[in-house]
Image (cartoon, helix red, strand yellow):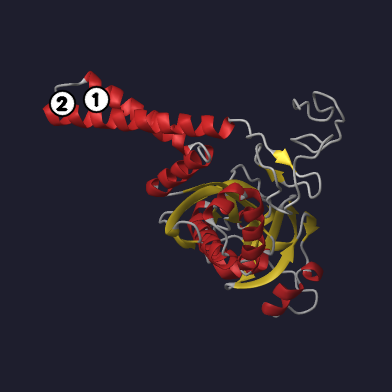
Amino acid sequence: MGFFSTNVLKAIEWQDSSKDTLVYKYPMDGRKIVFGSKLTVRESQVAIFLNKGKIADIFTPGTYTLHTSNLPILGTLLAWPYGFKSPFFADVFFVNTKQFTNQKWGTSNPITMRDSEFGTIRLRGYGTYSFKVDNAETFLKELFGTNSSFETDDINQYLKSILVSNISDTIAESKISALDIAGNLSEFSQVVTDNVSSEFEKLGLKLIKLIIENISFPEAVEKAIDTRSSMGVLEGKMDTYMKYQSANAIGEAAKNPGNGGVGASIGTGMALGEVIRESIRSANTSKTEEKEEKPGKFCPECGAKNRVNAKFCSECGKPLATKGKCSKCGADVGKAKFCPECGTKQ
């Protein structure tokens, strides 16, 4: 009886003290399972019995007393006769179905894409994702094998490759610019999540959430973006900006008269003269544009504007020397010395 008591299991359970164990194989150590043994499956766990590598009965969270009625598949595999109660061999695996969060992913190699604004560029990205075992049976068949335990690190690299591959495909299919992707990371993350979910389902997993924290550009593209932003700020003010830059350059050259010798001095003088001439031209142009409109005489018949000293309208040919009409706007003035409409002296 002592030999019997040490070689059978009366209680089977797994108290998970880790944070990243996906599958735990219960240590049988050559012991058998006896009918009447207690099986405890905690929340976020699934217990699976295997016989010679074949999946048999599956138990969801709860406490069970093992007998032939709740081990139907294993009974069939072992060809148990009705009421058979002898101890038996079986492998018991506990699958952790909780959500595993804050799993890191990143692009080990740049993602190449065609961009409508910058041409062919390469992007890098990183972020986090969370997943859980959604179908324990499928997961054991597809990934686990016969190890005594299986942790997130054992599968993380494979899952990251699936994510990065789908991110690349999504970028190619979307045909949107890299700037739009970088500016809408939350929406893009959701699109990738929807696209990659089916790949996780094939492994018995469920992708809960994918977060793209950052999309980075090559240094040359970042400089081009900065330059474009600067040009946008200066739009409509380029003439002032060029004068300012020229004046700064001239000032810097004047501080270092020894650099370049006579040639540099001559060049500095010529540049300064050109800036001054341009400024004078701009000032004269502005003054000309600001001058008041030249006075004229309006035709009392057709309203056309004519020269102040014109006697006949250049449009209709009617005489302009009409008494009682304003020489400028054509309003009735009678014998007034100033037009009551425009104030012009008559």
Q: Which residue is painted at 78% across and 26% down in the image?
A: 343
Disc 2 marks a residue whose amino acid type is: Asn
Mark sitting earlier along the chain (1/2): 1
Quarter of the rendering containing residue 263 = top left
- Residue 311 has which mark? none
Give the quadrant of the N terminus: bottom right
Using the numbered discs, state the Cα–Cα distance from disc 1 to disc 2 in whole angstroms.
8 Å
Q: Which residue is painted at 54% across and 52% down in the image?
A: 152
Q: How many marks?
A: 2
Residue 346 placement (x, y as % from top left): 76, 27
Name the side, left or right, on which 236 lies relative to 94: left
Residue 89, relative to residue 248: is it above or below? below
Q: Is residue 127 visible?
A: yes
Residue count near mark 1 (Cα–Cα under 10 Å), binned few <14, some 14–19, many ≥20: some
Q: In terms of depth relative to the viewer, which is nearer, 293 or 181?
A: 293
Disc 1 marks a residue whose amino acid type is: Ala
Q: In terms of depth relative to the viewer, which is nearer, 81 or 199?
A: 199
Contact (CB < 8 A) between labels 1 and 2?
yes
Residue 6 placement (x, y as % from top left): 61, 54
Residue located beneath label 2 in the image: 259
Which residue extends farthest top? 255
Q: Is residue 1 visible?
A: no
Residue 81 placement (x, y as % from top left): 76, 79
Residue located beneath label 1 in the image: 253
Element assignment for label 2:
loop
